[in-house]
Image (tube, rainbow, N blue to C red):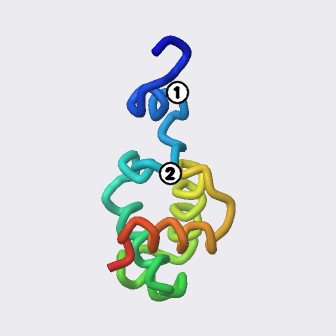
Amino acid sequence: MEGHLTNLEALIVSNGKEDGVALHGGLSGQERELLALIGQGQAIKQIAAALGVCEKTVWTMRQRVLKKLELRTTADLVKYALKRGLAD
């Protein structure tokens, strides 16, 4: 099958972007927890209390997660978390 990529090859070429395949695997434990809390609809103040950090730290972490997942908005984070069952 020359000229055709296998599923694995397509995932490698797309750098994991194919249907958002496990980009969250590159997140730290605290970043994954943040993503779950955002997916649950928690406010920044609530997330800060749950993680034991200040609100500014939550904003900074949120920005890092957005960048790592190649997303743009909080709504994108919520959709990402819900679609992948991370907001449980």
Q: Which residue is mark 1?
A: 13
Indicate which disc, 2 or 1, sits on the residue closer to the N terminus.
1
Q: Which residue is mark 2?
A: 20
Residue at the spot 51% in from the left edge and 61% down from the top edge: 61
Position of 19 with respect to 36 (left or right) is right
* Callout 2 amino acid: Gly
Residue 70 screen position, x and y as percent: 60, 50
Locate the C terminus and report the quarter of the image it occupies.
Answer: bottom left
Residue at the spot 51% in from the left edge and 34% down from the top edge: 15
Q: Nearer the viewer, residue 27 or 19?
A: 19
Residue 62 screen position, x and y as percent: 55, 64
Q: Residue furthest front?
A: 1
Q: Residue furthest right?
A: 72
Asked if 69 appears above or below 35 in the picture, the reply is: above
Quarter of the figure with residue 82? bottom left
Asked if 3 appears above or below 18 in the picture, the reply is: above
Q: Secondary structure at mark 1?
A: helix
Q: Residue furthest top?
A: 2
Q: Secondary structure at mark 2?
A: helix
Asked if 66 appears above or below 57 in the picture, the reply is: above
